[in-house]
Image (cartoon, helix red, strand yellow):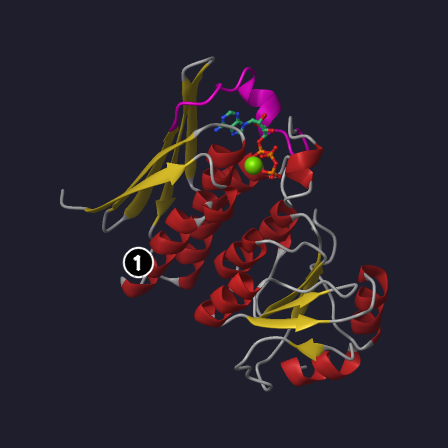
Amino acid sequence: MVVADIIKLLDAKVISQDIDMNHPVKTVCGSDMMSDVLAFVKQDAVLLTGLNNLQVLRTAEMMDIVCIVFVRGKTPSPEMIEMADELNIYLLGTQYTMFDTCGILYEAGLRGGRKVNE
Amino acid sequence: MNSIHYHYIVDGEDFARAGEASSSLKSKLKQLGLSPDVIRRCSIAIYEGEINMVIHANGGDIDVDIFPEKIVMVLKDTGPGIPDIDLAMQAGWSTAKEDIHDLGFGAGMGLPNMKKSSDEMNIETEIGVGTTVTMVINVTS
Ligand SMILES: Nc1ncnc2c1ncn2[C@@H]1O[C@H](COP(=O)(O)OP(=O)(O)OP(=O)(O)O)[C@@H](O)[C@H]1O
Ligand SMILES: [Mg+2]
């Protein structure tokens, strides 16, 4: 799966200026808790979140997250958009809730990190 | 032995700027050409520690020394100290309140993740004086 597929599946709005539609995406993490993201995210991940502050971007930077999808219609501030562009992290927005966003991507074949104790 | 040294001052008053030291270190480690695994583990460890310095203490200093065989990160704050380190190290244990949760932190996952990400971790703390967390990450070639 690639970024373009995520956009299509989630009927997502592309917030970032420059976006590599063909960047591969392998796993997904959905959370509003950044310390969970820091504990569980795997490679080439998409982050689904309803949290809307600069630490979402810092967390994504630390974890080399490919793209962030803001769920339930949340929109990042201009400062966040600028920072994401600098960090080369793609920002998307969807009107779906967290549950539905996860469900749509799961149904399309994407997975998270299995059980945390495995 | 020669090492590369970096010093960062962490502002305890400004949550929006928390993570700037971690971000800066991460780019330095990339420039030095360290392995992705080492960079990832350092980034997680220092960022969780930096966030703790801002949300639980009043900020402080971070010193990083990069040796050929290891990276040593020392995070020193002048915050309230940690009354029970064993308890604080337990996954899920946190004193953070609603205001911290709203910022996306306070799940009690930081310290266990810092320990997991580093090869050695040591916490020195004194109530009312502050906390110093030292983490060592081995560089395997
Ligand atoms: N530098 C510090 N100074 C004082 N207390 C600290 C410090 N770091 C951690 N603590 C205490 O230890 C507890 C556990 O820390 P930990 O980082 O594991 O979780 P958290 O910061 O509460 O949540 P999370 O890291 O998941 O956002 C904290 O809630 C806090 O009470
Ligand atoms: Mg923490």
Q: Which image quarter holds the C terminus of chain B?
A: bottom left
Q: Position of residue A6 (x, y in %)?
A: 71, 78
Q: Position of residue B25 (x, y in %)?
A: 34, 52
Residue B118 found in image quarter: top left
Tell me: A68 left or right of A72: left
Residue name at image x 60 percent, y 80 percent: A24
Tell me: A110 left or right of B129: right
Q: Is residue A85 magenta?
A: no
Please give the chain letter of the residue carrying mark 1: B
Q: Position of residue A28 (x, y in %)?
A: 69, 65
Classed neighbour count for the residue bearing mark 1: other residues with Cα under 10 Å, few (<14), some (14–19), many (≥20): some
Q: Which residue is mark 1?
A: B28
Residue type marked 1:
Lys
Q: Quick one: which residue is furthest to the top in this view?
A: B127
Q: Is residue A27 visible?
A: yes
Residue name at image x 40 percent, y 23 percent: B78
Q: Foreground residue, A98 or A107?
A: A98
Q: Foreground residue, A62 or A82?
A: A82
Q: Is residue B87 magenta?
A: yes
User: Which residues, given as a range, are shown in magenta?
Assistant: B77-93
Q: Is residue A80 above or below residue A66?
A: above
For the stretch drawn in magenta, what is the main secondary structure? loop
